[in-house]
Each structure stands twice: as C-alpha cells, then as structure tokens.
C-alpha cells in the first residue's frame, strides 16, 4: 500500500508540472499526462505488479467518464443513435479488423493470430478521444457525435471479442464450452485478469442460465436507477449532509461496476447504462458535480500510467520498425474511417475530425493483447511489440488533434464567405460592423435619432431577418478592406465594432485606426482582457457587453438595502468614472503573454486601484451625509 501511494504521489506531482505546460503550449492536457508518465516511469522504475495495480486503479476513471457521458444522454437520444451505433460503429470495427488482419497475414502471422491482432488494434482510445473532444468543445459537432457513436460501439464489441479469442487459441485450446455443457466465459476470465479474481455469478452455469443471469442483472440496474435512486437521494437531501451525495454517487458507480464484473460484462459499459437510466433524474446535475473531480483525477492517472508503461529498452532496440508500424496502424485505420465518413455523408471538418480522432489503438487493446497472450493466441514476443505499438499510437493522438486544427483552420480560410458579398452603393456617417443583439440596439437608437447607418454583417440569415423588419444591411465580412472602403470608411465619422469574434474585432479596430487616425471608434468588448486589446488597437470608446447592465443591477441592489435613488445613482456614477480610469491604467501594465493572475505588476496596480475605489465611494457617502445634515 505504501508503494502504491508513493507511485501515485510521484505521478501526480509530475502531472502538476507537465500538464499546465502542455496546456499553455496548446497541446492539451492528455499529452501533458502522457509526457509526465514517460519522464517519471523510467526514472523510478515503476514496472511489474505494482505498476499494474496502479493502472487498474486508474482505469476506474474510464468507468466514471462513461457514467457521466451516459448522464448526458436520454434513452430516446440513444435510440436515435442506433443507426450510427450499428452501421457506422459496426462497420468501423469489422473493416478495420479485416484490413489489419490482412496486413498481419502478409507479414507472416498465422490466421488466428492475425484475427486477434486485427481485433485488438481496431479499437480506439475512449479515454483520450472523449477527454480531448470535451476539452476542445468538439463533442457536439457532427464529427464528435459520430466519433462517440463508434467509441460506444467499440466498448460494446469488447464483450463478444473476449468471448471469441479463446476459440482462436493456437496452443492449448481454451474452450468456451465445457464437457458438461456449461460455459466458462472468457470475458469473466478477462475481468478477473484485469480487476482481481472476484467471485462470478455465471461461472459453470449452462448457456441459457448465463443469459438469464446477465439479463437479470441488467434489468436490476435499470429498475434500481428508475425506482430506487430517487428515494435514496431524497432521504439524503432531508438529512442535509452534503458529503453523503458524493458518497452515494461513488457507491452507485463502484457498485454497478462490481456487479457487471460478476456477470462478465464490461464495468464501463455497465456504468454507461446506469448513466443513461439516470439521465432524466432530477439529481443528474448533483451526480455530475460530485463525480467530475474524481473522473478528471483518475483519467489523468490513467494517461500517466500509459506513458510510464512503455518499455523503452524494447522500444530502442527496434525503434524504427515500431514507429513505422504505429504510423501504419494510424494510416490504415484513418483510410477506413475517412471512407466511412464519406459513405455516411460527413463533410469537411467533421469528416477530418472523425478520421483523425479515432485512428489510434486504445486502452482496450492492452486488455485484448494481454488476454490473447494468456490464451496462446498471440506469441509473447509479438504481444510485447503490439503493446508498444498501441502505446505509441495513443501518444501520437494529441498530435493528430493538432493536425485536425490546422486542417480545420485552412479549410475555414479557403472556404471564404458562404454567400457572395453585396455590392455596397451607399455611404453614411456611421458604419456598424456586426448586427447581433448588441449592434441591433445601437443601430435602432442611431437611426431613430435621424442619422444614417451602414450596417455590415457576414451572416446571411441575420441580414435577411433585418430586411424583413425594414432595416437595410449589407452582406459581407466587415474585416475586408474593400468592403469597408465601399461603405465609406474614408468619410465616416464613427465606426461601431460590434462583432462576436474577439480576434476579428481587434483586427478591424487596428486596421481602421491605421487608415483613419481621426476616426472615432466605438468597440464592443467581451471581457476585460479584450478591453485591453481594443485599447491598444486604437479604440476610443470601449463597451463591455455586460458592464452597463451589471451596473444597473447593482444600483437596484443599493436602492433596496437603504440608499436613496439619488445616492445609488451617485454611487453608480462614481464607480463608472473610476472604472474607466482603472481600465486605462491597467492597460498600461497588462501583458497579453502573461495571465493576469501571474502578472505581479498588474495585480499590484489592481489592488491599489480597488482601494482608491473604496475611498472614493466612502467619500461620496460622507459628502451626501454632510449635505443632508
């Protein structure tokens, strides 16, 4: 136990250093965890049974992740995915297996061994892919949803694969059917191998009894999720013990995983099923908030153990071939995935996301390869190389996501505008770039006051909606110089930058300031760092989109806790005037390359200005009291 805690503490300490660095470089947290494992593993020689113990503990993070994903899916949504689960996911497993199997046979492997290799390498990494999709906000895209469907199908496919592998044994045959007609399920043996030898509810039972027990356990999970969890949660809620929510959430996941292991089913699959059942529960968000920290920590530990588990002695002895084979696996799976993406009408970036996110081998590959070796299906020397290839493909996966981002950016730049820009044949004293909720109010106020505006927006639907309500606007990208010139940038008196895209808004302000040093620019800012960017780009008036509404809400608060309307209004005006000066002073010490929380000069100036604000507000109160006296 002491050794286990020592290993875990060393790994987590490495992660605290490596993960923020990887995130800062834009590489994602997964690559940081893998890098931490690679560095720490050889240094501390964490190999053998102790390493396996830590890995099995960390694998519970995958179980929690699937439970939380299940919470986000209603049963109806899962039913609507059936075509992708059976079609897209099923074809991916079958086709990838056949192609990799053919390559293994061509390399001289026996038929049974080739099948096992194909099955093991056809599965992708649920942990890495889902974590990265969530981090990068890609889960709800067409490519992200398709990738999730395939991953879910692969998790389900592990069950029949584990049952099939003993039948392929090339040495001592490990039959799935005993002489007396009972079944010794391979999946139970794999569960025992991976999670410790636990008692089984199905070992030695006839086939029909195994089926009944398995279906009974699944039904029990569903019924308990529907009828038992709500009363238990209500009981804990009445007790008022906040920590018991976390205890119950952990009990649900651990209990279901253990129950699934007893009948030879995947713990991750059981947890996913339980999550789907509880998706409509009023306590869903409570479960998510309680388990999210545990999931993140255990998943990080899992990624670290993958990196630490690489046998570098074996790797450096045959590095070129292993890297070549890992790249070959990614290419073969990538081609299959790309063709399936086309067949299922995934387009553009979605197809590339689907292809690149699933091209690696996964954590279930470790289980299948180890189990195949135990059953004499894959020779030990071949298995060692396969484990290294699997780990290498997982290490390459974060780089594939970076490649996707480069492709996506190029496709976005090459696509250009969806519609042909309008020919702008009018000029006006006010140009409004961006006509969303913010720009609409500005436009209505200025036009209603008798001034002409020239409205530019790149969204066709927004422009069409404006026209239906009698407001004229021009379709086009406001950042394009030719459109700005046509709209009368050289003669305009005011430019309003109200675009949603922060980077484009800053770029437009900088361009307009270079072209017209005398132009008055009013810009919408998303947050305070964006204010600083716009300030340095040359904007005259910068409006934070939530600032004025927040001030109004604060004024209502002051009026209802004892201040008069006049006093509350005076406090708001003082705060407003001070904040405008504060932003200008903070902009001088702001550095875009250093987070505000780590910029010592910025923090010191902010504290100083906050004390000045308190003094100004207290002085205002004192003056009001003196006048009223």
Image (cartoon, rainbow, N blue to C red):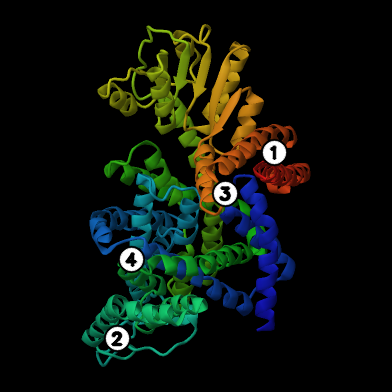
Compared to residue 73, the image places residue 278 above or below, namely below
Residue pictured at 36% horizontal, 10% vertical: 423
Q: Quadrant of residue 201?
A: bottom left
Relative to 123, 58 lies left or right: right
Compared to residue 180, the image places residue 167 above or below, namely above
Relative to 327, 213 lies left or right: left
Whether the residues at callouts 1 and 2 have beta carbons within 8 Å, the answer is: no
Separation of marks 3 and 4 at Cα, in angstroms: 46 Å
Separation of marks 4 and 2 at Cα, in angstroms: 35 Å
Q: Is residue 360 visible?
A: no
Residue pictured at 57% horizontal, 66% vertical: 297
Badge 2 marks a residue whose secondary structure is: loop
User: Is tag 4's residue or tag 1's residue first in the polypeptide sequence?
Assistant: 4
Expressed as whole percent of the image width and height from the top left, the position of residue 594 reads 71, 42
Q: Where does label 3 land, which residue?
A: 563
User: Is tag 1's residue or tag 2's residue first in the polypeptide sequence?
Assistant: 2
């Amino acid at each position: 136990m002491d050794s286990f805690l020592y290993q875990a503490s060393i790994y987590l300490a490495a992660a605290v250093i490596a993960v923020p660095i990887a995130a800062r470089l834009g590489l994602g947290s997964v690559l940081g965890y893998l890098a931490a494992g690679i560095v720490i593993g050889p240094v501390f020689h964490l190999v053998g049974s102790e390493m396996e113990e830590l890995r099995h503990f960390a694998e519970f993070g995958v179980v929690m992740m699937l439970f939380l994903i299940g919470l986000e899916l209603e049963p109806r949504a899962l039913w609507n995915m059936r075509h992708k689960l059976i079609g897209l996911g099923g074809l991916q497993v079958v086709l990838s297996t056949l192609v990799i199997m053919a390559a293994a046979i061509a390399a001289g492997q026996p038929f049974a061994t080739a099948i096992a290799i194909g099955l093991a390498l056809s599965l992708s990494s649920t942990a890495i892919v889902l974590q990265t999709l969530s981090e990068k906000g890609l889960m709800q895209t067409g490519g992200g949803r398709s990738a999730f469907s395939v991953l879910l199908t692969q998790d389900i496919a592990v069950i029949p694969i584990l049952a099939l592998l003993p039948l392929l044994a090339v040495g001592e045959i490990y039959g799935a059917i005993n002489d007396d007609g009972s079944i010794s399920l391979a999946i139970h043996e794999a569960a025992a191998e991976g999670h410790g030898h636990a008692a089984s509810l199905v070992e030695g039972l006839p086939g029909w009894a195994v089926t009944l027990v398995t279906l009974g356990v699944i039904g029990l999970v569903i019924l308990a999720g529907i009828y038992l969890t709500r009363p238990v949660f209500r009981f804990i809620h009445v007790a008022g013990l906040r920590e018991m929510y976390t205890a119950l959430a952990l009990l649900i996941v651990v209990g279901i995983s253990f129950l699934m292991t007893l009948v030879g089913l995947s713990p991750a699959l059981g947890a996913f099923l339980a999550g789907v059942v509880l998706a409509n529960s009023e306590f869903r968000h409570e479960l998510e908030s309680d388990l999210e920290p545990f999931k993140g920590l255990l998943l990080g530990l899992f990624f670290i153990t993958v990196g630490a588990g690489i046998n570098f002695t074996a790797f450096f002895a045959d590095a070129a071939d292993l890297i070549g084979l890992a790249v070959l696996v990614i290419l073969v799976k990538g081609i299959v995935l790309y063709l399936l993406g086309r067949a299922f009408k995934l387009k553009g970036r979605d197809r590339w996301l689907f292809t690149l996110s699933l091209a690696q081998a996964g954590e279930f590959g470790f289980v299948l390869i180890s189990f195949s070796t135990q059953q004499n299906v894959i020779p030990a020397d071949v298995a060692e190389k396969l484990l290294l290839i699997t780990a290498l493909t997982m290490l390459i996966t974060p780089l594939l996501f970076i490649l996707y981002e480069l492709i996506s950016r190029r496709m976005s730049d090459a696509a250009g505008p969806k519609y042909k820009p309008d020919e702008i044949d009018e000029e006006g004293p006010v140009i409004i770039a961006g006509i969303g909720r913010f720009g609409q109010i500005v436009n209505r106020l200025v036009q209603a006051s008798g001034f002409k505006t020239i409205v530019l927006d790149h969204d066709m639907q927004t422009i069409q909606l404006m026209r239906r309500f009698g407001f004229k606007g021009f379709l086009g990208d406001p950042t394009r110089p030719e459109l700005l010139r046509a709209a009368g940038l050289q003669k305009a008196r005011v430019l309003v930058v109200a675009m949603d895209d922060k980077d484009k808004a800053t770029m437009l302000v900088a361009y307009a300031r270079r072209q017209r040093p005398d132009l008055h620019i009013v810009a919408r800012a998303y947050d305070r760092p964006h204010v600083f960017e716009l300030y340095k780009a040359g904007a005259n008036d910068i409006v934070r989109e939530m600032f004025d509404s927040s001030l109004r809400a604060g004024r209502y608060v002051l009026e209802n806790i004892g201040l008069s309307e006049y006093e509350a209004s005076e406090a708001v005006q003082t705060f407003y005037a001070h904040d405008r000066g504060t932003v200008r002073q903070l902009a001088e010490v702001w550095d875009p390359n250093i987070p505000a929380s780590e910029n010592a000069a910025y923090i010191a100036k902010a504290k100083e200005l906050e004390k000045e604000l308190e003094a100004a507000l207290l002085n205002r109160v004192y003056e009001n009291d003196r006048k009223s006296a």
